[in-house]
Image (tube, rainbow, N blue to C red):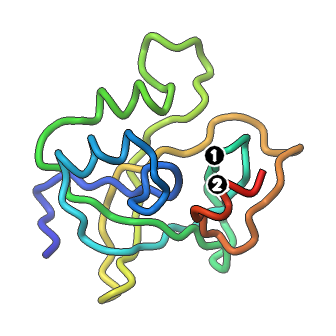
Amino acid sequence: MVDKNKEYLFVYGTLKQNIGNDMYHLLAKHAKFIGEATWNGKLYMVKDYPGAVKSDDSSDTVYGELYLLNNNILPALDEYEECSDKFAKPTLYKRIKNKVKLLINGKIVNSWIYIYNMPVDNLRIIKSGNFTFLTAHSL
């Protein structure tokens, strides 16, 4: 199920399959859904989308989905997440590799993740750590 020689992507926001975002369809076309996963971080509501930041507190959990990338769609996703070279620095997000945990079997996978790259002081925290369709449409 998990191949250490492959590239993985952890998504926690508008790229999740049940959110209804058009960009998800590009992801689904070029990646295989592996399963639900978690990442050690905090989730904030930015506008009508979330932003996750790393946390040192092991009880802080962001819930999302893990995908196996079939080909290199990362440049297109970098554009969507506003972190490609054509965006002014600092970019809204940055793409890093970090460990995520698959919920189905507890395996740890080194995966790409887009983390929020701006201050979170005035943002509302999503306490559940889970961005859903209802969260997206409750503003």
Tag count? 2
Depth order, front residue of 22/131: 22
Answer left or right for 2 relative to 91. left
Does 16 appear above or below 106?
Answer: above
Q: Assign a secondary structure to mark 2.
A: helix
Instruction: Say which mark, if any, is on residue 136.
Output: 2
The quadrant in which the N terminus is found is bottom left
Q: Position of residue 122 (x, y in %)?
A: 89, 43
Instruction: Say which mark, if any, is on residue 64.
Output: none
Q: Nearer the viewer, mark 1 or mark 2?
A: 2
Q: Position of residue 78 (x, y in %)?
A: 39, 30
**Lower position in the chain sequence, tag 1 or tag 2:** 1
Q: Assign a secondary structure to mark 1.
A: loop
Please identify the quarter of the rendering in which residue 21 is found.
top left
Q: Position of residue 79 (x, y in %)?
A: 41, 24
Depth order, front residue of 18/32: 18
Instruction: Name the residue rendered at 51%, 25% in the picture.
Output: 82
Residue occupying the far bottom of the picture: 105
Q: Which residue is mark 1?
A: 49
Q: Position of residue 70 (x, y in %)?
A: 12, 48
The three-letter code of the residue at mark 2 reads Ala
Answer left or right for 115 relative to 29. right
Instruction: Name the residue rendered at 48%, 26% in the picture.
Output: 83
Instruction: Name the residue rendered at 69%, 72% in the picture.
Output: 57
Answer left or right for 119 relative to 95. right
Depth order, front residue of 55/133: 133
Contact between marks 1 and 2 (CB within 8 A): the answer is yes
The three-letter code of the residue at mark 1 reads Tyr
> Distance from label 1 to label 2 (Cα)?
6 Å
